[in-house]
Image (tube, rainbow, N blue to C red):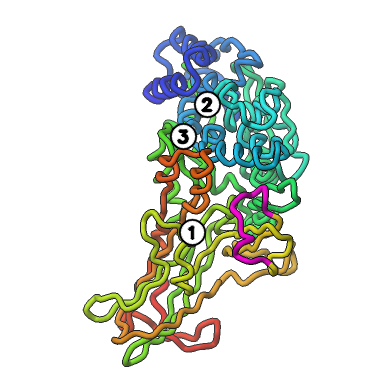
């Protein structure tokens, strides 16, 4: 019951004691039946049913939850404590509380005279929009906390995906919680049904995620394209061994004892492939939030082996070097960076040393507290990957003065990111790109280069994006200061002539290349 108690305490913290009515009812049932074993409810919310251990009849069903009670994630915590605990640490739970989202929305509504409408809040607090509690997200402090964020009741009651961006999801609000279990048993606190939209093994499940993870602005700019990028990748090919949905990566199978579907005394549930609800990507909470450290570690794990670099060089006997650095996105089913790529920054740090360990050359060394783009003028070879937004319709005609971080003002984008694994040419939805993306470095040094070190860094939200929100008074400076920088640890490479092997690179040059791993 440890996970159950933790989840109840967390539910009380998140939604207050009144929100615990549903799960306390479930707990009461457990107490009536005894100490409370694990099992019993299908993923997506149904009791997994079947006879009790030893062939005895299953226990009496728990009193059904009302439609209103089902709107509260705390009602799920009583029977699904582990899933609730993981969700409560997720960016879905954080979505409407995120001070950066609120600051951007406030600034955007003010500067557009309200024309931004529900573009942001429709994905960050969909139930509040569906229930008519907000039209623009400016009054979220007046909306009950359990109706903020992306909740159990929203995702598990989607009945149809009616588009590809800006949350066109049709929400049933019918008391039936849908999931990936094909044979949910009756008699649980709520009705349950199978839906391919909640089944990571079904390609249509990606459309459910993609509905919010693709964003088109009122100006018609396809700002966030994660779902489209996935559709253009090798991972979206139906019938292929490479088929990998959003849930396969971000909600992997969890067979730990704590991840049992639900608590129900005396029930021996069938084996289920349940999935984790932490859903790590690259974003983390910038304020005190449940499971913050757990999420940060999960993000590091997601990023660790995201890219495969190749570091090749030719060094002069008296100094200087020519370097070819290739970065390949081998693990993400979309581009890197993706999503809010207008705000994200990924860059390579390359440092050359002499035999005594003195630095001879560096590029991409970003001091703490400095934006990754701030040193581009002084470091023109810096490899910085991001989307750049402009206030003009043709990025080829844009000047530095036209650049903007305000997505509502963006009229065109210049994309600088790494493509994901590509579809075969015969199945391509767009012209295939070379996934081995090259950056050349040329530099002179006064002494011979003996060693070259590579590190790759990522900021989910960079300081030059947050600074204007602080300046406008929409964001607390302490929140901006909490923005993390992650190293992609698996992309570290060390080049020395002794360890490198001679090979012909993709440019046709014969260089010494560091070992690939």
**Residue 428 in view in this figure:** no
Quadrant where the C terminus is found in the figure: bottom left
**Distance (Cα) linking label 2 and label 1:** 36 Å
Name which residue lies at 52% across and 48% down: 468
Q: Quadrant of residue 240?
A: bottom right
Q: Estimate the spatial distance between the alpha carbons at disc 1 and disc 3, rounded to whole Å.
A: 23 Å
The kind of secondary structure element at disc 2 is: loop
What distance separates the C-alpha of mark 2 from that of mark 3? 27 Å
Q: Is residue 157 above or below residue 386?
A: above
Q: Which mark is residue 89?
A: 3
Q: Earlier in the sequence, mark 1 or mark 3?
A: 3
- From what the image shows, is residue 403 above or below residue 116? below
Instruction: Indicate which disc residue 306 carries.
Output: 1
Which residue is under mark 2?
269
Image spot of residue 89 (x, y percent):
46, 34
| For discs 1 and 3, the disc positioned in front in the rendered view | 3
Observer-nearest residue: 482 or 128? 482
Is residue 403 inside the magenta stretch? yes
Q: Position of residue 79 (x, y in %)?
A: 50, 21
The magenta segment = 398-410
Looking at this view, is 401 or 97 the one in front? Answer: 401
Position of residue 394 measured from the top left corner of the image (x, y, whole percent): 72, 64
Q: Is residue 51 magenta?
A: no
């Amino acid at each position: 019951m440890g996970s159950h108690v933790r989840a109840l305490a967390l539910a009380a913290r998140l939604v207050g004691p009144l929100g615990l009515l549903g799960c306390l009812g479930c707990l009461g049932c457990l107490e009536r039946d005894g100490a409370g074993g694990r099992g019993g409810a299908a993923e997506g919310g149904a009791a997994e049913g079947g006879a009790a251990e030893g062939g005895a009849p299953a226990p009496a069903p728990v009193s059904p939850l009302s439609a209103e009670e089902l709107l509260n994630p705390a009602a799920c915590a009583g029977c699904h404590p582990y899933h609730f605990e993981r969700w409560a640490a997720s960016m879905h739970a954080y979505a409407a509380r995120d001070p950066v989202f609120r600051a951007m929305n406030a600034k955007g509504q003010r500067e557009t005279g309200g024309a931004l409408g529900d573009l942001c809040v429709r994905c960050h607090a969909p139930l509040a929009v569906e229930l008519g509690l907000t039209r623009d997200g400016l009054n979220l402090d007046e909306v009950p906390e359990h109706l903020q964020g992306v909740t159990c009741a929203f995702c598990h009651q989607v009945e149809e995906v009616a588009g590809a961006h800006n949350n066109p999801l049709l929400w049933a609000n019918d008391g039936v919680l849908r999931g990936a279990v094909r044979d949910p048993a009756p008699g649980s606190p709520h009705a349950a049904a199978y839906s391919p939209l909640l089944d990571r093994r079904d390609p249509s499940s990606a459309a459910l995620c993609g509905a919010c993870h693709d964003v088109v602005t009122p100006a018609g700019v396809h700002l966030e394209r994660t779902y489209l990028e996935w559709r253009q990748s090798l991972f979206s090919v139906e019938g292929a061994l490479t088929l990998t949905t959003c849930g396969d990566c971000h909600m992997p199978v969890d067979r730990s004892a704590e991840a049992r579907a639900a608590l129900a005394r005396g029930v021996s549930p069938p084996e289920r492939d349940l999935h984790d609800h932490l859903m790590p990507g690259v974003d983390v909470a910038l304020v005190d939030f449940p499971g913050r450290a757990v999420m940060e570690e999960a993000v590091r794990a997601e990023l660790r082996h995201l890219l495969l670099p190749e570091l090749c060089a030719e060094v002069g006997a008296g100094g200087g070097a020519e370097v070819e650095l290739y970065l390949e996105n081998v693990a993400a089913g979309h581009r890197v960076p993706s999503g809010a790529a207008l705000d994200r920054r990924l860059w390579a740090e390359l440092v050359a040393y002499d035999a005594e360990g003195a630095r001879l050359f560096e590029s991409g060394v970003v001091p703490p507290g400095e934006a990754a783009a701030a040193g581009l003028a002084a470091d023109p070879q810096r490899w910085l990957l991001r989307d750049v937004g402009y206030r003009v319709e043709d990025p080829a005609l844009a000047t530095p003065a036209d650049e903007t971080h305000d997505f509502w003002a963006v009229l065109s984008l210049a994309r600088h990111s790494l493509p994901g694994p590509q579809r075969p040419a015969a199945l391509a939805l767009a012209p295939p790109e070379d996934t081995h993306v090259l950056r050349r470095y040329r530099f002179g040094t006064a002494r011979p280069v003996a060693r070259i070190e590579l590190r790759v860094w990522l900021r989910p939200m960079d300081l030059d994006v947050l600074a204007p929100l602080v300046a406008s008074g929409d964001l607390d400076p302490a929140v901006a200061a909490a923005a993390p920088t992650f190293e992609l640890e698996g992309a570290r490479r060390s080049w020395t002539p002794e360890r490198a092997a001679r090979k012909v690179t993709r440019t046709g040059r014969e260089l010494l290349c560091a070992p690939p791993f």
